[in-house]
Image: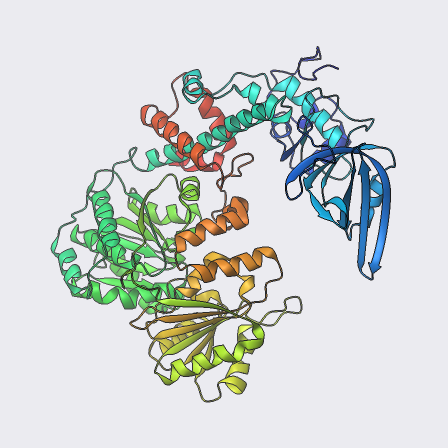
Amino acid sequence: MTDPLTAPTHRAGRFASWSAPVVSSRYVDGSRAALLARLEIHTVGDLIGHVPYRYLDLTSTYSLLKAPTGAEATVVGRVHDIKVKKPRSRLTIVEVAIVDGTGVLLGVWFNQAYMADRFRIGESVAFAGTVEFDFGFKKMTNPYVERLDNEDEVEDVTRIIPVHRSTEGLTKNWLRRLICAAVEDFSDIPDPLPSDIREELDLVSLHTAYRDIHFPKTMRASESARRRLVFDEFLMLQLGLFARRHAAVEGRRGFAHETSGPKRSALDAAVPFNPTDDQSAAIRDVLSDMSGVHPMNRMLMGDVGTGKTLVAAHALAAAADSGSQAAMMAPTEVLAQQYSEKVGPWLDAANIEWGCVTGATTAAERQRLLDCLEDGTLQVLFGTHALIEKSVSFKNLTLAIVDEQHRFGVAQRLALREKGGSADLLVMSATPIPRSLALTLYGDLAVSYLRQRPHGAGAPRVSTSIIDKRHRSQAYDRIREAVSEGYQAYVVCALVEESDTAQAKAATDEATRLSSEVFPGLRVAVLTGRMRSDEKTATMNSFRSGEIDVLVSTTVIEVGVDVPNATVMIVEDAERFGLAQLHQLRGRVGRGESAGEFMLFADPKTDGGRARMRAIADTNDGFELAERDLVLRGEGQILGDRQHGMPELRVASIVFDGEILQQARGIAKRIIESDPALEHPANVPLGIVARDRFSAAWEWVSSG
């Protein structure tokens, strides 16, 4: 038997570009290219980069007799019997018995009748999965299956079989054959990673990495290969982020603000509470950046209720002290209006002229504000995405603040900043994310964290309970009690109106039901994102002033809404919400002197749904919840929830590869500090690969 990677074969295409169409690779004709396209494989590089998601290690198998129960194992045997059972309607059980001379093991599949047709009596197969013992037999439920004597099988002396994600019409064996040919013909290319870095970190060459990730002779070889490929992905991404940061900060001259002026002192005196240690540290970070000669490029990340607005207010005052202008952009009209009501009085006390522009602003008031903005008499402007419209023109914008920044695209953030040329940029988020994810998404930003709540570090200010929907009367009683004590409540629904396809409470219908059937003596109102701007503003103003007892809402109140008198919240169909969203909703109660109650009506049907409910009940710490969410959902889904154009990590895992991420970040920082444009001959290949692999991270570098 010969090793397919060392046997004499056709190598004419070895130096062809990895960007060549996949039909350039051996054995790939038009029909196979169409099948590969279903797997997002369009080029030779895509084919080589289609790495296995698991391995079948036949160098470490158990006999059926010694296969350990309760543990993962790989076993090999011949198919002895195939049975299809139907113990009751809507339940089909397929049992495939394999034997090896020492014993018997059953592979079991529920409601997958087609599995019976995928086996032949006498064929040799490998099963991989968790071994159980039931009714006198060892068994595996839904094991991974590999046929070992298929006529299409690629010869492989290593007996470690890679398992690649495949598609109907393209067998696993044929896919292995195509990848083997591509690796053989195209992977022996110059390594873009400088040899000194490879030696420093003990990394294998790129050619070795691709050979051993697909066809390892030992599992240790596959691990070394994966480590190299993970490092490359993180390095290329971090190079782009550091280059973007250099272009935004070190590569530009900014506006040096006055950070110890009278307006900031007056604002500080007007704030009726002392900042937490975290707030004080964040204020120092921001003011230090603002006083420098390079533009600020900072993120302020804080848990719910930790007081990001105070930090932003100090930055706004510093801009006013400097004789320039500042803008603060929010994702919703409700939140933009809240800035006016909360920060406005502090700015008034500091003699700072300010205004707010949203969709609800009258034409006359809008024009007045724009005129004052253009002539410089207006120093601070709050608003929604309306701030980036062409009609909004600043005389001297030196500070741009973007709140809940993940709700805006990169282009929108930059559009606001660039209204002032090289204005300082402060982006804020009340959605904590794990450090590893922050370095991946926002590695071009310096980060300040807020974890302490102004109310102190005592007992949690919001209690959380999961309530069976059959016991909803208990939650309604708590709302009645709270209102009788002078407080207010929220009821949050996932939908605006009832849907034929969604079995969930809808806000408009639920408001009607609660008002007439459950709380006939209370003042109930509804708030949704579909309402007109003036209607939303009027409803929120009425709720803040205490004219509404119970506000039935969609998630339009999720971010930033601050009504200290609201102490109780019910969330309908809580299993439909993500952890971050539930944590944000929880942050709307318990914001005043009285503790809050957060009650979830939930009936989760999946393990993931039940795990989310346990997590939200277990902790009030947003950063801890973020870590749990990352483990539960994986970075793929969370990255998808974030910025448009964020990178796809094919090999690396933010959940499990944090140490390699830190290594790659350190190397990237070192390279960009010494060679920002990657012009040194040793770094040119890195730049080419990095720009090709993670173009989104380099977009602003080339345009900025």
Q: In this view, does 528 lie to the left or right of 186?
A: left
Q: Is residue 235 above or below residue 134?
A: above
Q: Quadrant of residue 346?
A: bottom left
Residue 146 image position (x, y, % from top left): 75, 34
Horizontal side of residue 657 vs 341, given as left or right: right
Tell me the residue at 60%/56% (across/down).
607
Q: Nearer the viewer, residue 134 or 300?
A: 134
Residue at 73% from the left image edge and 25% from the top image edge:
177
- Please tell me which residue is depicted at 72% across the width and 30% down the height of the picture: 175
Q: Where is residue 682 in the image (x, y as percent from the top left)?
A: 41, 17
Q: Which of 691 and 566 is in front in this view?
A: 566
Q: Is residue 408 visible?
A: no
Protein image colouring? rainbow
Residue extending farthest bottom: 521
Q: Quadrant of residue 367?
A: bottom left
Which quadrant does the C terminus fall into?
top left
Classify the position of the N terminus by image quarter.
top right
**Residue 96 or residue 427, whichever sits in front:** 96
Judge from the rendering whether residue 450 lies leftward or rightward of residue 43; answer left or right.
left
